[in-house]
Amino acid sequence: MAKDVVDQLNRIASDVDFSRRSQELVDCWTSAGAGVETIEPILRFMESHSTIDYGTPGPLVHFLEGFYGAGYEAELISSVQRRPTPQTAWMLNRMINGTRIPEATKHFVAVMEQAIQNPLADRQTIALLRGFFEHQSRVGS
């Protein structure tokens, strides 16, 4: 299933209506019973296609967030540590906003702070991460 997910995403990567097309894929994956095995391939796709307009937040994000508590958090952190992108930085910020456990929040904010120094992060991602980090630092004070 994971390889199929990547192949399907690669086929629509240059589509001008990526968000609509990705919703169609999500619907198919959901009907087929796709599970946590899809998290990493989708995040790796996002890492290698950082300029796609995924939507706000978009079908892929909603799909991935459906696995919260089932491995999504760890996979997202790994992705941000490997190669942060605007989309994954935004997803990390959403995860922080939804977390009600202070220790988890501190951990996620620390991951965000480290990601700012990641040499694979582009300027747009670094600026986004800095803004999120400053906000989360004020909120957490």
Image (tube, grey):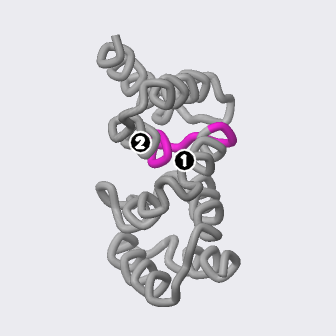
Quarter where residue 40 is shown: bottom right
Determine whether, in the image, residue 120 is placed left or right of residue 60: right
Q: Secondary structure at mark 1?
A: helix
Q: What's the residue at 50%, 53% (across, down)?
A: 69
Determine whether, in the image, residue 38 is placed left or right of residue 119: left
Determine whether, in the image, residue 87 is placed left or right of residue 74: left
Q: Secondary structure at mark 2?
A: helix
Instruction: Using the numbered discs, state the Cα–Cα distance from disc 1 to disc 2 in whole angstroms.
Output: 8 Å
Q: Decide: marks 1, 2 in contact (CB < 8 A)?
A: yes
Q: What's the residue at 58%, 63% (across, down)?
A: 39
Which mark, by number, is residue 95?
A: 2
Residue type pointed to by label 1: Glu
Q: Is residue 38 magenta?
A: no
Which one is earlier in the sequence, the residue at label 1 or at label 2?
Answer: 1
Q: Is residue 86 magenta?
A: yes
Image coords of residue 79 (percent x, y): 63, 46
Image coords of residue 23 (percent x, y): 37, 77
Q: What type of secondary structure mainly makes up the magenta span?
A: helix
The N terminus - image quarter: bottom right
Image coords of residue 87 (percent x, y): 45, 48
Which mark, by number, is residue 22?
A: none
Identify the residue position indicated by label 1 in the image. Answer: 73
Residue type pointed to by label 2: Met
Range of residues picked out in magenta: 81-89
Image coords of residue 72 (percent x, y): 54, 54
